Image (spheres, rainbow, N blue to C red):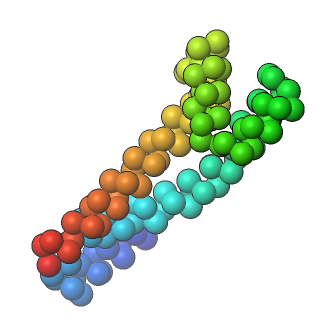
Amino acid sequence: MSGFSLYLREQLKKQGNIRLREYVGCAIPGKADKVLSVLGVIIHVWTMILAFKIKGFYAAFMTFFFPVLSQIFWFFKIGAKVGYTKSWFCISLMVYAILWVLVLLGFLAAQGRSDEV
């Protein structure tokens, strides 16, 4: 068993009224949040480099100040040209979006505990 599984089992034995959903709901955002932070910085720098290589300094400058809009723009621009599953940039943005969904679902699961206690 993993360390988290043992910890979870121990906590559930100690406090019988705490549900499994509370721990899972808190663990998903806790783990994915760190990955999101690091991956977000890497993707932002990567987007600026791609913008500079494709369109020059002005595009990189705009990408620096409008990161989310630029990432969406370059995702569709590069994906349409190369293919969404053939570009590591597009794949990394899709993974990044999935991690955001996992974090939001984890927060929703953790938030549901106040209704049931």
Residue 14 at x, y = what percent? 24, 87
Residue 61 at x, y = what percent? 80, 39
User: Up-down: is 43 above or below 115?
Assistant: above
User: Up-down: is 96 above or below 13?
Assistant: above
Q: Quadrant of the C terminus?
A: bottom left
Residue in the picture at 61% in, 28% down: 73
Residue 40 at x, y = what percent? 62, 49
User: Up-down: is 112 above or below 88?
Assistant: below
Residue in the picture at 40% in, 47% down: 101
| Res. 51 image quadrant | top right
Give the number of marks.
0
- Decide if residue 114 is on the left or right side of residue 54: left
Q: Is residue 2 visible?
A: no
Residue in the picture at 60% in, 37% down: 69
For the residue pair 1 and 37, the one nearer the viewer reads as: 37
- Decide if residue 10 is on the left or right side of residue 79: left
Residue 7 at x, y = what percent? 36, 76
- Decide if residue 8 is on the left or right side of residue 30: left
**Residue at the extreme top:** 81
For the residue pair 41 and 92, the one nearer the viewer reads as: 41
Q: Quadrant of the N terminus?
A: bottom left
| Res. 109 image quadrant | bottom left
**Residue at the extreme bottom:** 14
| Res. 22 image quadrant | bottom left
For the residue pair 13 and 110, the one nearer the viewer reads as: 110
Q: Is residue 109 visible?
A: yes
